[in-house]
Amino acid sequence: MTVQINSAAIIGGGYMGGGMAQSLALSGVCCKIADIDAEAARKSVDRLVEEGRRYEGEGLFPSGAGELLESNLRAAHSLADAVDDVDYVAEVVPERLELKQSVIGQISAAAKSGTIIGSNTSAIPISTLAESSAEPENFLGVHWMNPSYFVPSVEIIPTVSTSAGAVEAVEKLLGRAGKVATQVSDSAGFVANRLQFALYQEAVRMVEEGLADPAQIDEVVSNSFGFRLAVFGPFAIADIAGLDVYEGAFRSMEAAYGERFAAPSLLREKVAAGQLGMKSGQGFLAMDPAQAGGLAKYRDRAYAELGALKQRLGNPPID
Ligand SMILES: NC(=O)c1ccc[n+]([C@@H]2O[C@H](COP(=O)([O-])OP(=O)(O)OC[C@H]3O[C@@H](n4cnc5c(N)ncnc54)[C@H](O)[C@@H]3O)[C@@H](O)[C@H]2O)c1
């Protein structure tokens, strides 16, 4: 039987926890916020309601958002006061292992049996944190993106001990809040941050090497493959381009930068087997060449609309 989550507590009402609380409250879930003390929790709720009213006025939040936030958000006096009678608790304190372990232990001690606990850690393996919970079957990673209300994705990271019922209950909660919840394996950085940090590491390396400055890199990325990433993931993009093309580019970069740019063996195997992506009907994804016309039309419409949106918004206000 799946547990239905009707009430939640957010432990750590800062940047991420605040946005998560707004998202859940706007989906109709009553949400208590605890922070380092009652005063910090109260300030967090005040800030979230005030921001919600402003965003409603600016058309960024739906009509009625301010009122809904006011009725569904409550500042808790303490962690125990926040978690003792709710169905779901989100741990959203700063990214320090010992702090998270201590807070998860406190949540477990104060919550009723059966309460589901989700950690918003960015990169700590969930199995490491699960050791601090009293009921590992009710513990999982629930990793929201920044800013929580606006970015659709949430990674759900069960451990080997997490029950299917807990995963399903969290999926339903996120679905209600309009999120795109994707279950991923438990490994450091999960999917989003492992990829994001690989990109960032290479970008900083280019600055260190004096090849480009940060503003140039940002301009190229957000107007090239970053532009495409709003619509397609790296596998669809590579299948559309052709895996043989990718293998050739890897060869040139491996010659310049060494082993870290060698073509992955799975890519080489696919090319050797004639699985080149859309042009052969199969790459990493199944791509029927008969559907190529429809896909190109979708892509071009999406890019035209994205281009127009970017033009309308103008450049970000960064000096
Ligand atoms: N900022 C991001 O872009 C982002 C994105 C995804 C995930 N995360 C993760 O979310 C978590 C929180 O990050 P953030 O950016 O919201 O940090 P933040 O500093 O804005 O918020 C953390 C909040 O936790 C409170 N806090 C600290 N110790 C506490 C305790 N013992 N009990 C209760 N509350 C306590 C702080 O007062 C603060 O309000 C981290 O694990 C971070 O890695 C952050």
Image (cartoon, grey):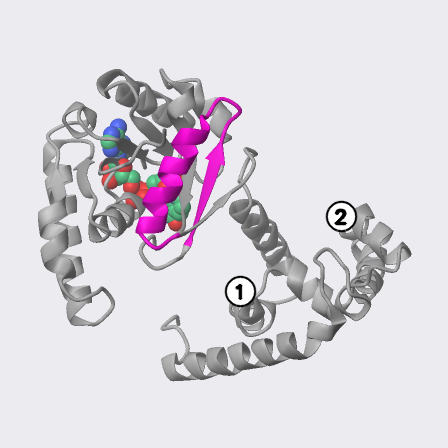
Magenta-highlighted residues: 153-179
- Where 252 sits versus 68, above or below? below
Tell me, yes or no, if residue 264 can be seen here. Answer: no
Q: Assign ligand 1 to one image quadrant.
A: top left
Residue 11 % position (x, y)? 25, 34
- Where 186 sits versus 300, above or below? above
Q: Judge by depth and name the residue closer to the eye, 15 or 245.
A: 245
Which image quarter: residue 293? bottom right
- Few, some or many C-alpha atoms within 10 Å of disc 1 (few <14, some 14-19, many ≥20)? few
Sequence-earlier tag: 1 or 2: 1
Which residue bears the numbered disc 2? 260
Quadrant where the image shows the C terminus: bottom left
Residue 219 % position (x, y)? 53, 72
- State the mark number for residue 117: none
Residue 3 % position (x, y)? 32, 31
Q: Amino acid at mark 2?
A: Arg
Tell me, yes or no, if residue 268 can be seen here. Answer: yes
- Where 45 sits versus 33, above or below? below
Which image quarter: residue 226? bottom right
Describe residue 261's horizontal placement relative to residue 85 as left or right. right
Q: Residue at horizontal 61%, vertical 67%?
A: 212
- Few, some or many C-alpha atoms within 10 Å of disc 2 (few <14, some 14-19, many ≥20)? few
Is 156 part of what is drawn in magenta?
A: yes
- State the mark number for residue 214: 1
Residue 125 % position (x, y)? 51, 30
Q: Amino acid at mark 1?
A: Pro
- Where 165 sits versus 265, above or below? above
| Distance from the alpha carbon under mark 1 to that under mark 2 | 22 Å
